[in-house]
Image: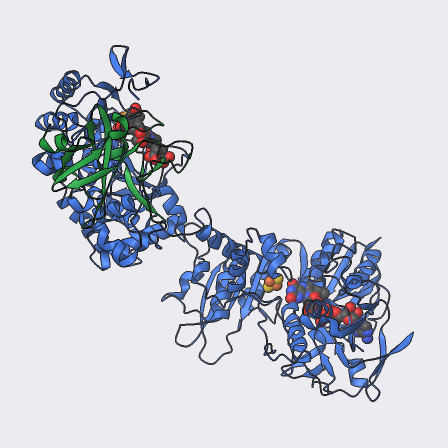
Amino acid sequence: MKKQLVVIGNGMVGHHFAEQLMSSAAATEYELRIFAEEPCRAYDRVHLSEYFDHPSKTHLQLGDEDFYSKHQIQLHLAEPVTKIDRDVKKVISNSGEYVYDILVFATGSYPFVPPIPGNDQPHCLVYRTLEDLDAIQASADGAAHGVVVGGGLLGLEAAHALKKLGLESHVVEFAPRLMPVQLDTEAGTLLRRKIEDLDVGVHTSKATEQIIEGQDKRLRMCFNDGSYLETDLIVFSAGIRPQDKLAAEAGLTIGQRGGILVDSHCCSSDPHIYAIGECAVWNHQQFGLVAPGYTMARAALAHILDDRSTQFSGADMSTKLKLLGVDVGSIGDAHGTSPGALNYRYADELTGVYRKLVVSEDGKHLLGAILIGDNSFYDTLLQYALNGIELPSSPEMLILPSSTGEAVSLSSSALPTEATICSCHNVTKGNICEAIDQGAISLADIKSTTKAATGCGGCAAMAKSILDSELEKRGVHVDKSLCEHFHFTRQELFHVVKVEEIKTFDALIERHGKGGGCEICKPAVASILASVWNEHIHEPAHVALQDTNDTFMANMQKNGTYSVVPRIPGGEITPAMLISIGEVGKKYNLYTKITGGQRIDLFGATLDELPKIWEELIAAGFETGHAYGKSLRTVKSCIGDTWCRYGVQDSMSMAIRLENRYKGLRSPHKVKMAVSGCTRECAEAQSKDIGVIATEKGWNLFVCGNGGMKPRHADLFATDLDDETLIRYIDRVLMFYVYTADRLQRTSVWMESLDGGLEYLRQVVIEDRLGLAKELESRMQHVVNTYQCEWKSALQDPTKRKRFRSYVNADEPRRARIEMIEERGQMIPARQIAEEEYS
Amino acid sequence: MNSLAKTIPEWLEVCHLDDLVMGSGVAVLVKGKAVAIFAIGSNDFKLYAISHKDPFSNADVLAHGIVCEGNGVWTVASPIYKQHFRLDTGECLEDPTVTVNTWPIRLRGNLVEINTSDEVS
Ligand code: SRM
Ligand SMILES: Cc1cc2nc3c(=O)[nH]c(=O)nc-3n(C[C@H](O)[C@H](O)[C@H](O)COP(=O)(O)OP(=O)(O)OC[C@H]3O[C@@H](n4cnc5c(N)ncnc54)[C@H](O)[C@@H]3O)c2cc1C
Ligand code: SF4
Ligand code: FES
């Protein structure tokens, strides 16, 4: 015969126990019988107040509709157990007697009603069950005024509910401040002000002596200071008491202040009887939250099933909630009672924000915290407290307002795998990652596979941010590896190259990769090598790494010919230079066009013509425009105060200076810049990776914009900079981008992928948070110092020049079977390329 | 024509070892045809000869693509629309219905030769 397992109480914890048992392998060995005092099956008491918004009992129901029938659980609704006979191991109700092998108390608690004379009249109510809410609703009918006795969490929630029922609502608290358990005086005062602003009357330090019939309203509450308050209904919310009567009568050991005494297996003084949830006390403490109750349920079940893995060893009582629309959070040792504890406090009385940190004596760990007015700080602080993560050197940063108004967040990657994310269901970051590995892609998936965020719901935001960052980590490229040859990201390879001073692709793949390389890793490594060592891309070790465009330092066009784009810094060009471009174009019969980047593109050159064309351009004073490279393209400019009547700075000179400084830089993707001479912004600087706009006092720097497929406006990064600071900041931003971006990631996408985004970039670049600024600058200076016009050096070296032969065995190249036609006076590829005559 | 080509008619000398670029390709003209020649591996390199013409763009460009290795198979990625062609068989990985021509190739001394007897016949 199956073992008889009886649970008394079908509240949140009793239900959780049933679910856990049913999902365990031992489910079939037990016959489960559950007694419920309430007339409906287990529901979500945490969200009880929602019952006023959705007056349907099934809305809050826990678990699937058919959960109990499917698992053949005997559920006795509205049948409270009235007696237990431990000698014969039986529970007795009004309608029968049932034997048990194992008995579990999950009777929860009952609302404490202070022993005030007159507290038992009609319209004196409590706030715990659906039936209580029905009673409140009925009483509110025809009432205008309601009072809640008790200014704790539940009291304030009840006051909110009364307000929503249309009553003028008041809170009467015995202590001198609201939420005395969770808040200190300052926070309590602030909360009081916020709540009063919402038209809820707050009366602290008031002890009610008696409740009598009222004159204007139904009831009158008389206080010990002689004052009184008249009201139509009273809700008592003065705390909870463990529901231990039945257990006490059965002779189980009861704690000093009530509650069934249990050990860390949730076992009572009778080895066949367990107690879990709010009816139990462990270490003389009752836990009035659902998460510890769930842990107790798992601990008890583990013990029953003879598995010692889960024990109950106390619980975190941190809470965050919105009370009447006001964010309130309390974490750990909020009152700072631990020996040596130190405080940090931030208060803004204007907007009603208060934040307090309680840290350990050595300032390294967070012990507790209080938040009023903005709970966006809660998740991060809770993780610091729960996981003992070492605090940053200035912990105040965690509660000080940032310039973006956003809370500093602990990136989910900083959390250890074993960090508990959902305390209700004991779900760790590791569990969430596993679920993602097994295919979860939404919070709904995470909820159904791990149960995270399905208890109190407090962890939902954190779970979501882990999901997002983990997905992003796997996301678009599920595998972050560069390609099959390197199981590293571009950033990792960059570090390897630098740290190990690797100078060639072959050395890198031999040490850190496998196979022969491909079109993904070869150019990426070439770009890294160029960023770090800045050697000519035609050195024999690099030559096979480049895509055609880089190999031949020209962009291949659709017919196999190439384009030629000389650099025209800032778009400024003398008539003489313009003429020499024209002459080259004419001589080689190149199609000529002004580009969108303020320079000139010559199209239709064959491989063997390229060196000749460049020889002539270089002789005329031109340099390569790197139109082929992942590198600086153009610095677009307006004419600025050189000519323009509105210009406030010399945007031309600055654009030329920037273009000449960064022209050799190899980067993860192309980089574009612009400089405008005033806010009219004729150079469209805000659509560039680096945008500079003149102000009366200097330059405003914008970063991380682009046009192209997904246009994005650049963000204002720093204002009124002088020339030198401007250059320093650009050096740092660009080098940090070169150091850390993924391949083919433009600055905008890169910046958004940084944890902390723009603000983080500011910290790195402006505040030098990583202490990298000097290195970034000197790296950039190295690139600037070692700049060479690649075309010039290629032409000087006969072996490099040898590469530019259309056919290595034929001197006389032909304009290789590419049919050209004339259009508007220039040659272009025929719209359809003719089939080869001899194939 | 030099003496080698005369003694072994089907093998044609196309270029010198020094003309090759290790790990990459060069183009040669053979009897009016553009052929792409690749030298893969550094010391113990292997030679391949495939058509220089990219069948997707009809432009003569394949010798100038990036050489790739995947699961031990060597390919070249067309520099225009990036399809991969096997160096040994000429097969296009993205579209197996497309195959470019390949030729036997060998090194004799410092000279690179390809065998064009297929077309001669
Ligand atoms: C020539 C030019 C068009 C023109 O006739 O004006 C041009 C031509 C090409 N663009 Fe562009 N882009 C040109 C200005 C732009 C601009 C406008 C600008 O720079 O002010 C943009 C949008 C602004 C931006 O980049 O933020 C632009 C956005 C792109 C993109 C999309 C980038 C993106 O992040 O979404 C590509 C594709 C890519 O880089 O991956 C691209 C790629 C190309 C390539 C390289 C495509 C290719 O692989 O063949 C074209 C060949 C250029 C060549 O052979 O020289 N081109 N391209 C312009 C050259 C500017 C120059 O002097 O260097
Ligand atoms: C309005 C409100 C808001 C809350 N908000 C939060 C929150 O935000 N976060 C949080 O963590 N917690 C919150 N709580 C507390 C949380 O609801 C409780 O911690 C949780 O419900 C405790 O579960 P339990 O199973 O121990 O007790 P209960 O859910 O109270 O279940 C006990 C059940 O046992 C039944 N029972 C008692 N005696 C018998 C008997 N003799 N025979 C049969 N059945 C019996 C009772 O009728 C009851 O249904 C809130 C509570 C309320 C009322
Ligand atoms: S931006 Fe405006 S002010 Fe500046 S140069 Fe252009 S037009 Fe003149
Ligand atoms: S912490 Fe309560 S649902 Fe996750």
Front-most of residues B111 and B43: B111
Specify the quadrant that holds the N terminus of chain B: top left
- x, y (%) of residue A311? 60, 78
Across the whole image, how many numbered discs are drawn on residues? 0
Vertical arrangement, residue B102 with respect to residue A344, above or below: above
Residue A263 in sight in this render: yes
- x, y (%) of residue A42? 76, 64
Front-most of residues A566 and B95: B95
Rendered image quadrant of residue B81: top left
Q: Residue furthest right?
A: A95
Rendered image quadrant of residue B5: top left
- x, y (%) of residue A795? 10, 34
Seen in the image, is A608 located left or right of residue A314? left
Seen in the image, is A127 located left or right of residue B17? right
Which lettered chain is shown in green? B
Which lettered chain is shown in blue? A
Q: Quadrant of ligand 3?
A: top left
- x, y (%) of residue A800? 12, 37
Specify the quadrant that holds the C terminus of chain B: top left
Residue A789 in sight in this render: no
Front-most of residues A364 and A550: A550
Seen in the image, is A598 located left or right of residue A417? left
Vertical arrangement, residue A400 with respect to residue A3, above or below: above
Q: How is the image coloured?
A: by chain
Front-most of residues A378 and A268: A268
